[in-house]
Image (spheres, rainbow, N blue to C red):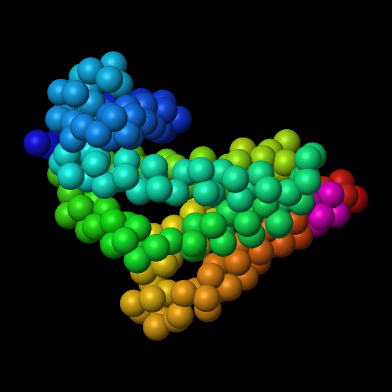
Amino acid sequence: MAVKPDAGRPAQRRRTRKAIVDATTALLAQGKTPSVDDVAAAAEVSRRTVYMHFPTLDQLLIDATVGALSQQLVDRAIDAGRQGDDDVEDRVERMVRALHDVTPEVERLGRSLIRLTVASAGTSSTQDAPRRGYRRVEWIESALSPWRERLSPSQWRRLVAALAMVVGWEALIVQRDVCGLSAADGEELSVWAARAFLRATLQELRERPARRQRRRS
């Protein structure tokens, strides 16, 4: 069932998608295999809205299952530092390592989710409407939160997007299938790449006052 999403803002679409997945997760936890009608009722949205975000019920069920298996693990990893810890590099590293800590069964589900999302491309979403990954974006934003006030909106969006490229299922599949890396080597590569983006951002922040001074001179 192909439904075009509305032109709502990305944050609102993410909240709606999260509500749908959370409702599905709760129904699965009750031992039910929910229908689209069950999910729509629990999330207090229409069937059309469910299909707008998830073209097939299988995709929704896999997304909810993967989330249920990984949510607490990653949340705990991000917050595992000392109280008041604002070392973003450490927070991001813990997040990256937690995302790599997947069982073969969860990896299989993740690959299935990628396959279903790619198969539905062009039939259910516009190019600027994310078809998955809201959970990953939330984790990245949580790990980066101590820097929120230091970065401009454009810098924040760019850094979140950059980190989203080097963690998650797509990165894991490239590491395994394209580069032939072991799980351990792939994890270290993601940590290295994430730190490179963070340090490049810090360097940019350090250079910004100097550039302003040169323009004034």
**Where residue 195 sits in the image (x, y, percent)?**
66, 64
Taken as a whole, is the magenta stretch helix, strand or loop? Answer: helix
Q: Residue at x 62, y 70 (%)?
A: 192
Relative side of 80 to 104, left or right: right
**Height in image: 30 above or below 165?**
above
List the single residue furthest toward the bottom: 180
Q: Give the extent of the magenta segment.
A: 204-210
- x and y percent of residue 16 in the render? 36, 27
Is 162 situated above or below 28?
Answer: below
Quarter holding residue 152: top right
Q: Is residue 158 left or right of residue 108?
A: right
| Residue 155 appears anywhere in the view | no
Residue extending farthest front: 31
Residues 98 and 214: in front is 98
Q: Is residue 205 magenta?
A: yes
Report the residue at 41% width, 81% height from top. 179
- Give the residue furthest to the right: 217
Q: Residue at x 19, y 23 (%)?
A: 38
Residue 25 vs residue 2, the one in the foreground: 25
